Image: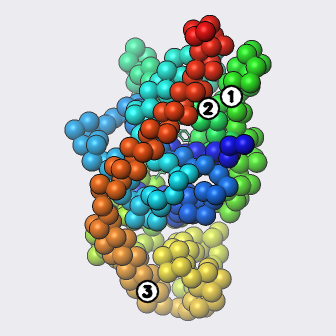
Amino acid sequence: MSKPVILTGIRANNSLHIGNYFGALLPMVDMAQNKADEYQINLFIPDLHSLTADLDYANFQSVILNNLKMYVSAGLPLNKADVYIYRQSFIPAHSELTILLNSFIGMGELSRMTQYKEKSAKFHEDRIPVSLFSYPVLMAADILAYGASYIPVGDDQTQHLEFTRDVAIRINNLFGDIFVVPRPVKQQHALFMKDQGLRIKDLVDPSKKMSKSSESDKGTIFLNDKPEDAYTKIMASTTDSLGVINYDKASQPGISNLLEILSLVSKEPLDQIISSYQGQTSYGEFKKIVAAEVRDFLMKFQSSFDKIDEAEIYDKLKLSEIVMNQQANKTVYRLQKALGLRS
Ligand code: ADP
Ligand code: TRP
């Protein structure tokens, strides 16, 4: 019996922030470190999906490499047999499967996708990229090609996961057992303990989550920020006029966010941090402590980033991509046979 597959794609970005790091990257690294005996772990860069948005083509290769280096700096093990890292465009089966699935998917269901509605709104109708429209089909192919059961993604992707399940069930009803149907999304959340839902807030407007798409970068700590700049951002963060430190997300969101950040970067449990600082009245002194810890955290992270051996990453990619091609081709072949394209 093959192991259940946990699979996720992370779009390569210019930089990740500490919200992505603690909320998405570390949980995934943790799975790769601790769950590879029980599960096959597929972690890939959906580089074809990136073509659906504005992209600096000339720099794209270095952005991808930088992201992979960040994963490794965060602790992603490269020496584990059942942990695979790969690039979507290096596995042609994803594209092939997309074309095959297209005949079993309706325009209506794709046009109802929230992400499509939001992202297509800025285009003249004649110029909405078809790739934006068919984004969920490629995503379904990414998942179904490997028979993945668990797919950790942000909440904005839930609709695409439900769609993937629908497509798998639809094809299986027509042709028998072609695809492994991913687990219902709620069961997936249980595996990743998603209900703990970490949400680091924006430093300037702590009513919003920290995000790379905020208008200003003053509220966001990026992993490649200069440590001194990060220090300054924490010192300038928005607090409140109550003047006493308390962990109360509703009435003191700024201070509560700083307490959480301190706990994450210093690796001390949150209740311990809260009991150390609760009741203190100097926000300035408290901010200095948080700012210094964030600065140290970034210095360590960046120093490990600078030491990453790129050749090791490429070796791992090559090995993984060989295995992934074999696995995904098998799935495509099953469907091709069912469709009468192969005998
Ligand atoms: P962004 O808003 O920065 O574009 P994404 O929506 O691309 O982030 O999310 C990528 C991953 O990072 C998701 O798994 C998401 O849950 C996680 N994530 C994003 N922002 C935060 C945050 N502020 N705190 C915790 N996790 C976050
Ligand atoms: N659409 C996902 C996002 O924007 C990235 C992605 C592409 C993905 N293919 C996937 C995630 C397959 C999980 C599984 O975050």
Q: Which mark is residue 144?
A: 2
The crowd level at tag 2 (other Cα within 10 Å; few <14, some 14-19, many 20+) is many
SS for tag 2? helix
Mark 1 — residue?
179
Q: Amino acid at mark 2?
A: Leu
Q: Nearer the viewer, mark 3 or mark 2?
A: 2
Residues 178 and 264: in front is 178
Give the CA separation, mark 2 to mark 1.
6 Å
Q: Earlier in the sequence, mark 2 or mark 1?
A: 2
The quarter of the picture where the C terminus appears is top right
Q: Earlier in the sequence, mark 1 or mark 3?
A: 1
SS for tag 1? loop
Mark 3 — residue?
289
Lateral position of residue 226 relative to residue 49, left or right? left
Q: Earlier in the sequence, mark 3 or mark 2?
A: 2
Asked if 61 appears above or below 251 in the picture, the reply is above
